[in-house]
Amino acid sequence: MARRPLIAGNWKMNGLRGDGLALASALVQRMKAETGPAFDMVVCPPFTLVAGVGAAVAGSGIALGGQDCHGAEKGAHTGDIGAAMLADLGCAFVIVGHSERRTDHAETDAQVKVKAEAALAAGLTPIVCIGETASQRDAGDTMEVVKGQLAGSLPEGASAANTVIAYEPVWAIGTGRTPTTGEVQEVHALIRGELAARLGGGEGGAGGLRILYGGSVKPANAGELMALPDIDGGLIGGASLNADDFWAIAECCQ
């Protein structure tokens, strides 16, 4: 079943206004020069840049996303950002449950699920992140960890039309290490199977839901990763901060 690849750039806590606008403008120029791209693209800047980057990419075919949202619509949550606030700035996507949030802020699967449901309620597509640590991989627990995180984090009402899953082995993020293509495909196939059991296997469920891979994806390895049958694009960190590298990764989906 054909699934249109999604290339998502997670800028993390990087970029002042000039940096963000320059990067967004460089991507817009590449998109304008593209005839019928075979991929969808979204950039997720830090919150301080969302409005400016949103204005820069408006009408270009590049979507806008946030890096996190709170589970509540509004209220006394100093420093947090509601999903409706992101939508109000033009966001179409939001990352939830990234391993850096799970580690740095001790986010649980239950909290990630609530955030994903808040995203859906605000009309955003959550990119729900799951993945094992190095110790869990070394202990042979990858499959059980991934299954548990998926079961605990997937929002109620999830479907192929409104939800994206991103598998990011924690030990591969920003380290330069990547699993073998066989290991990546094995986990993605497991995720697809778990989704089928929960959502059904048709185009509206597991058959059409996009599962991204993340973790030290770069132009040199993107081609073989994107060619795997259950990989539907990438959640790109460091390489998304370089327009040439990010675009080269996207073009591997052609």
Image (cartoon, rainbow, N blue to C red):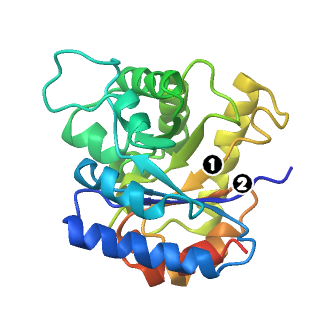
Q: Are marks 1 and 2 in contact (CB under 8 Å)?
A: yes
- Name the residue type under label 2: Asp
Q: Is residue 141 visible?
A: no
Q: Residue 69: x percent and y percent? A: 34, 33
Q: Nearer the viewer, residue 232 or 136?
A: 232
- The reply, left or right, for residue 75 in relation to residue 69 is left
Residue 80 in picture, x, y percent from top left: 21, 31
According to the image, label 2 marks what residue? Answer: 230
Mark 1: few, some, or many residues within 10 Å (few <14, many ≥20)?
many
For badge 1, the amino acid type reads: Ile
Q: Pick whichever of labels 1 and 2 is earlier in the sequence.
A: 1
Residue 45 vertical placement versus 26 (above, below): above
Quadrant occupied by the C terminus: bottom right
> Which residue is denoted by mark 1 in the rendering?
211
Nearer to the camera, 144 or 94: 94
**Residue 16 spot, x, y in % from top left:** 19, 65
Residue 87 appearing in the image = yes
Q: What is the CA distance from the residue labelled 1 to the residue labelled 2?
A: 7 Å
Q: Callout 2: 10 Å neighbours few (<14), some, many (20+)?
A: many
